[in-house]
Amino acid sequence: METASARTATARTAIPGSVPAGSPAAVFDKGQVLACSLSARAEGVRRGMRRRDAQSRCPDLAIFDHNPDAEARAFEAVLDEIEALSPGVAPLRPGLCALRVPSRYYGGEAEAAAVIAERLVGVGVWDCRIGIADGLFAAEQAARRALPQDSLIVAPGGSADFLRDLPVDVLDDPELIGLLRRMGLRTVGDFAALAGRDVHTRFGAHGALLHRFSRGQDPQPVSGRKPPPDFERSLMLEPPLELVEPIAFSLRTTAEQFVADLADQGLVCTTVRIEVDCDGALASMRSWLHPRWFGSSDLIDRVRWQLSAEGAVSAPVDCIRLIPEVVEPLGDHADSLFGAGHDERVDRGLARVQSMVGHEAVVSVAVQGGRGPADRQLMVPWGERAVVARPSGLPWPGSLPPPAPATVFATPQEALVVGAEGYPVGVSGRGMVTAEPMRFRAAAGEALQPVASWAGPWPIDELWWDGAAARRIARFQVVGVDGSAWLMIVENGHWWVEAKYD
């Protein structure tokens, strides 16, 4: 963890509870290293390195996906410990916070940093580094260069000298860094030597701000965080209850209070964690998402569904906790002035159907990324927000051009496409068709019909590095003389119908 101090201190720490102390670990975002542990850096892992390169340098590397929400929740415990020593801590991002150094109380800046480090080590945060400088930017760079459980103090007025020899990579702006390197500016001092007016003209307001940082002129004051109200609500059941309906009825007042307390702060809950205790121990826990925001009836329905799940609880329930995981401003979800808002009658009707047939039995359709039409389908239980596993905005080489087919078969149907001589059409290793498609059938047992037009192939070599899951196919769009249009695939010489255009 890093801490920065006016004097500004930045504290940089590992996220507690993520990996055993001393183990090589790295957090990846979009296939690149976002952060790595000290032992991983000792093996040659660096920020920005691709996953394959990082694993080649450190085969025992523990890999974690970037999860900002989980990291923020884990870092909250660190902030609480630092606030016990010095109020007014400003979290910058998970693992990094800033505060004004309480040097007079502890007898000096180094002594204050030692007290903070000792406090964090006492709660299991071993990798903590503290940097102290006149501004946030210089303090953060000092924290990055401090030793574990130690501090690096930049003398008052010495931020520009401290930053001068650092590489321009510390500016953390890939586009600007690339341009500066092409201009021959390799260090922060080289960038700081440019005239401020020229920098603003060439790089804009953001470039001018980074230029002031490079000169040790940090205009960002440290403002402490305001501890949020405690929105968690619990229902204690005395005596414990076994039946779902009495539990749901007893929860109504607690759920209404949960929603009302958030509304008083101008907030709504879009993700809630429901915990159920049986015999004094946690028996069931699940996070629920909502496409809009949770009302009291929505919370009761989620509790009912969670308790009704097979194997969820096996003893009488004595406590239920409602814990908001994601809250958002109410204004972001309010209805418009002239209507056209969310129709709550639809929600109530579908929620009623769910209560009769089960939570997973009523689904809505969402779109995610993928190459084939079946890959792009995402079925989400009604009332939950779609969590897209494959973002649609990413490039998907080999994906189909629009328009998308209207009917996608759950199981591809056996088909056949032949050339002029009656032999099945294939695709070579170079992606070329062996013969022009002349006739086809879209289902087994049908007669062959002439091809009116066709497009393709779109060859795809998926998961080529995995011998068990590797797949090499080619897609075609085929239109028959009867006007029917089909999306077909050929794999290992066999033809299948994947979807139909209506």
Image (cartoon, rainbow, N blue to C red):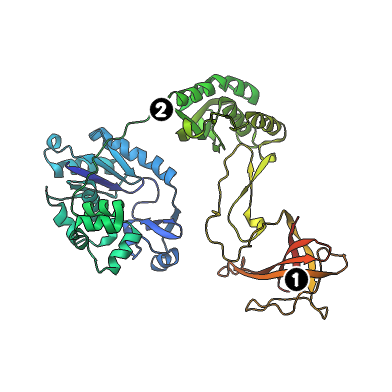
The residue shown at (33%, 49%) is 14
Q: Mark 2 = which residue? A: 230
Distance in Å between CA atoms under marks 1 and 2: 61 Å
Q: Nearer the viewer, residue 482 or 328?
A: 482
Amino acid under disc 2: Asp
Q: Is residue 187 above or below residue 350?
A: below
Residue type indicated by callout 1: His
Nearest the camera: 116 or 434?
Answer: 434
User: Position of 383 compared to 14: left or right?
Assistant: right
Residue labelled with disc 1: 494
Element on which disc 1 rests? strand
Residue 346, how many percent across, how many down? Answer: 66, 32
Q: Is residue 276 above or below residue 236?
A: below
Marked residue nearer the N-terminal end (1 or 2) = 2
> In which quadrant is the C terminus drawn?
bottom right
The image quadrant of residue 122 is top left
